[in-house]
């Protein structure tokens, strides 16, 4: 079996659902269930014996040791993290705790478990660390895209703590020989994304008739990847990636935020027209994020060259699927948009007015 951390979050849950659609290998899903973790996403697996869910914190060494000893996974896929840049600005402590201390604790537990394995299993074992392109910092409009050798230059507490975790993972390969793989991926979007991130937030606000809050001048650029493509890339890296290597994952889809919001409005205008006017009329410019990275862009050629991976979705097809999913799954959004969520939206946007 494989062990997945953070498998009740956006990408982790998509990964678990996709994995069990295609394969019969069981998944041990370890998640603390923070505000971002949602068991409702995993409801289709409720009666599926191949999915074992355990609520645990990756900072809890004893719990991790026990789970590894009991279930003996052949691989660990580490998704669990505090993942939202704006939250890291308001409260960085949780980011240091989960992203740095949690990854360290997981690495220590994995190392102890792996060291005691018989030689063949030891060789086959993998620790795959899921990271972000944000560790490379910010690009100007004319800079070349990030490659695997771009120096780290993180600018937010989120990206700094992810960079710290990447360095620890690298060190466990060089120092202890733990067979690690690291992936650095661009912005994901798709089903089950918590509505604090750009795309689901804009869809939710549009449908609720609320302002669509564009930070700064809306000209910041992100590379966007449909979540199922990210999951497929991770499966390739797990299967055939070379231990100690890092792989950039991207969608070849650089877009300005304002263009993303315009496209979303156009899709919603077609799918759920307003009685008068366009969803674009709800766009409002708000105070910028402090230290807001201007541009991220990924060169994903290594992954294509070495493992043959390419994204299946274009931005247009992926976004259309995403909008359709949110329109068809309002109940999921209502379930996760709890009291805590409403408090967050107030905290983040009140100060931007
Ligand atoms: P998410 O915030 O939606 O989910 C994170 C999950 O981790 C949640 O289920 C949460 O309950 C769990 N978690 C948090 N702290 C934990 C702890 N201490 N112990 C156990 N579980 C804990 O995040 P996501 O968007 O699914 O991102 C998953 C991973 O992918 C992260 O490592 C993130 O840095 C990385 N990543 C995300 C993106 C993106 O666009 N979302 C892009 C590139 C990389
Ligand atoms: P986000 O989804 O938070 O991802 P990240 O900061 O990790 O790239 O934001 C994507 C972009 O959208 C980023 O440039 C900030 C911007 N943004 C807004 O303009 N308004 C919003 O309400 C949010 C949440 C993000």
Image (cartoon, helix red, strand yellow):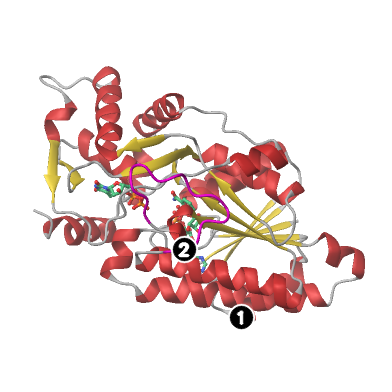
Outermost residue to the right: 119
Residue 66 seen: no
Residue 266 - label: none
The quarter holding residue 71 reads bottom right
251, 53: nearer the viewer: 251
| Numbered range of the magenta stretch | 138-153
Tell me: residue 290, above or below residue 270. below
Queried whether the magenta region covers residue 339, the answer comes back as: no
Tell me: residue 342, above or below residue 192. below
Q: How many marks?
A: 2
| Residue 98 appears left or right of 65 | left
Outermost residue to the bottom: 62
Q: Is mark 2 within 8 Å of ligand 1?
A: yes
Q: Which residue is mark 1?
A: 61
Helix, strand or loop at label 2? It is loop
145, 36: nearer the viewer: 145
Residue 315 seen: yes
Q: Residue at x 51, y 78 (%)?
A: 101
Tell me: residue 72, above or below residue 233. below
Badge 1: how crowded within 10 Å, few (<14), some, or many (20+)? some
C-alpha distance separating marks 1 and 2: 17 Å
Q: Which residue is mark 2?
A: 33
On the image, the x and y values in percent for residue 160 come to: 42, 68
Q: Residue at x 60, y 39 (%)?
A: 301
**Callout in the foreground (1, 2):** 1
| Residue 85 appears left or right of 243 | left
On the image, the x and y values in percent for residue 102 come to: 53, 74
Nearest to N terminus: mark 1 or mark 2: 2
On the image, the x and y values in percent for residue 13 come to: 54, 49
124, 335: nearer the viewer: 124
């Amino acid at each position: 079996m494989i062990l997945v951390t953070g498998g009740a979050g956006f990408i982790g849950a998509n990964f678990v659902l996709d994995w069990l659609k295609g394969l019969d290998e069981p998944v041990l899903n370890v998640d603390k269930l923070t505000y971002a973790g949602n068991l409702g996403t995993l409801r289709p697996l409720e009666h599926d014996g191949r999915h074992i869910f355990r609520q645990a914190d990756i900072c809890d060494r004893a719990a991790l040791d026990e789970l590894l000893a009991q279930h003996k996974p052949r691989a660990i896929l580490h998704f669990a993290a505090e993942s939202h840049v704006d939250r890291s600005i308001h409260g960085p402590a949780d980011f240091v705790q989960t992203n740095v201390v949690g990854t360290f604790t997981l690495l220590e537990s994995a190392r102890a478990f792996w060291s005691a394995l018989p030689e063949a299993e030891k060789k086959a074992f993998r620790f795959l660390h899921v990271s972000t392109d944000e560790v490379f910092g910010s690009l100007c409009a004319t800079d070349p895209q990030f490659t695997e050798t771009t120096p780290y230059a993180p600018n937010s507490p989120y990206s700094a703590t992810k960079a710290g975790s990447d360095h620890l993972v690298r060190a466990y390969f060089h120092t202890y020989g733990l067979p690690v793989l690291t992936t650095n991926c661009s912005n994901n979007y798709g089903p089950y994304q918590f509505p604090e991130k750009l795309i689901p937030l804009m869809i939710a606000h549009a449908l609720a008739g609320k302002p669509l809050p564009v930070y700064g001048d809306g000209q910041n650029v992100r590379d966007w990847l449909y979540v199922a493509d990210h999951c497929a890339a991770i499966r390739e890296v797990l299967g055939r990636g070379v231990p100690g290597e890092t792989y950039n994952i991207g969608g070849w889809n650089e877009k300005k935020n304002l263009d993303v919001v315009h496209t979303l409005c156009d899709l919603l205008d077609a799918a759920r027209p307003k009685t008068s006017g366009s969803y674009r009329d709800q766009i409002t410019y708000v105070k910028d994020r402090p230290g807001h990275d201007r541009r991220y862009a990924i060169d994903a050629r290594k992954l294509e060259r070495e493992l043959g991976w390419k994204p299946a979705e274009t931005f247009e097809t992926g976004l259309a699927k995403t909008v359709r999913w949110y329109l068809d799954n309002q109940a999921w959004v209502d379930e996760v948009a709890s009291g805590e969520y409403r408090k967050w939206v107030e905290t983040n946007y009140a100060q931007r007015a």
